[in-house]
Amino acid sequence: MITITDPAPVDSTSNGANGADPRRVRILGIGGSTRQGSKTLIVLKTALRFAEESGATAVLADVRALDLPVFDDDKPLEAYPASLARLVEEAKLADAFLFASPTYHGTISDAVKNALDALNFLWNDTDPYLQGKPVGLLALGGPGAVNTINALHHAARGLNGLSVPTTAAVPGGGVDEAAGTVTDKTGLGRIQATVSEVIDLASRLRRPITVPVE
C-alpha cells in the first residue's frame, strides 16, 4: 500500500496515461480522522487491502498524516505542506477513489471535508476534479452514519465523481482498534462489495470505446 506521506515520489515511469500503470486499477483512499489509532482509518485500510487483493494499486491519504491547514482558496499550492501536492498528483493518477469519514455530529468530519476541499486545485484541469471516475463511500458510526454517507455522496458529486451504488457504514463497536481489524461481518461484506463495484466500474471506464462501423 502506497501512502501519500512516503518520501518516494509518485511513480511516473510506466507507459500509462499520466504515468499510471496501464495494467492495474489505481485507487486513492482519502479519509481517517485526526485521532491516533483512528477506527475510520482501519476501515479505509481494510478497503484498500481488499483492493490490493483484487489486483489494484492502493494509495492511502490519511488525513492525520496529511496534517493540512484549513483550506484557503487565496493561497497557492506551494504555500501548503508538500503532502497536499502529493495528494493532488495522486488524484490525477487515480482511476478510482474511496472516501472514508467518521460520523461527527451527524455528518462528515472537518478533517475529511478539508482534504476534499483542497482538491479544488484540480478545478481548472481539462477534466476537472475527479474526472468523472468512480468513488466508494465508507463511514464509521451508528445510525447517524447514513447522514455521513449522504454527505460524502454530495461531496463526490460536487467533485465530479461517480458514487457506486453500494456503501459501507461500520459501527464503532465493529472495529478492533488494538488488532487494527474490522470485526463486524456485515460491515466487512459491504466494504468488500463497495470495493468490488469501484474496481469493476473503473475497469469498464478505462476500456476504449469502440463504435461499430456499418
Image: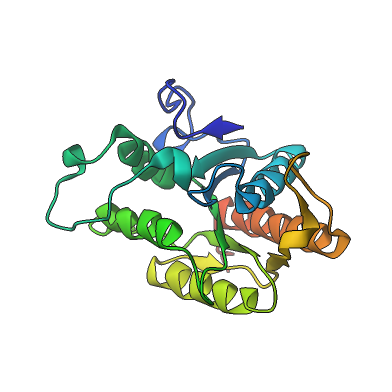
Q: Is 74 positioned to the left or the right of 80 in the image?
A: left
Q: Residue at x 72, y 63 (%)?
A: 170
Viewer-nearest residue: 154 or 169:
169
Image quarter where the N terminus lies is top right
Name the colouring of the figure: rainbow
**Residue 189: % across, % down:** 83, 60
Quadrant in the picture for residue 10: top left
Q: Residue at x 55, y 60 (%)?
A: 101
Quadrant in the picture for residue 23: top right
Position above or below: 110 against 8: below
Q: Which residue lies furthest to the right in this view?
A: 185
Residue 79 can be seen, yes or no: yes
Q: Residue at x 50, y 59 (%)?
A: 133
**Residue 108: % across, % down:** 49, 68
Q: How many marks?
A: 0
Viewer-nearest residue: 171 or 138:
171
Q: Is 70 positioned to the left or the right of 57 in the image?
A: left
Q: Which residue lies furthest to the left in this view?
A: 74
Quadrant in the picture for residue 214: bottom right
**Residue 34: % across, % down:** 48, 49
Position above or below: 206 against 55: below
Q: Is 85 positioned to the left or the right of 35 in the image?
A: left
Residue 126 can be seen, yes or no: no
Viewer-nearest residue: 70 or 93:
70
Q: Is 67 positioned to the left or the right of 182 in the image?
A: left
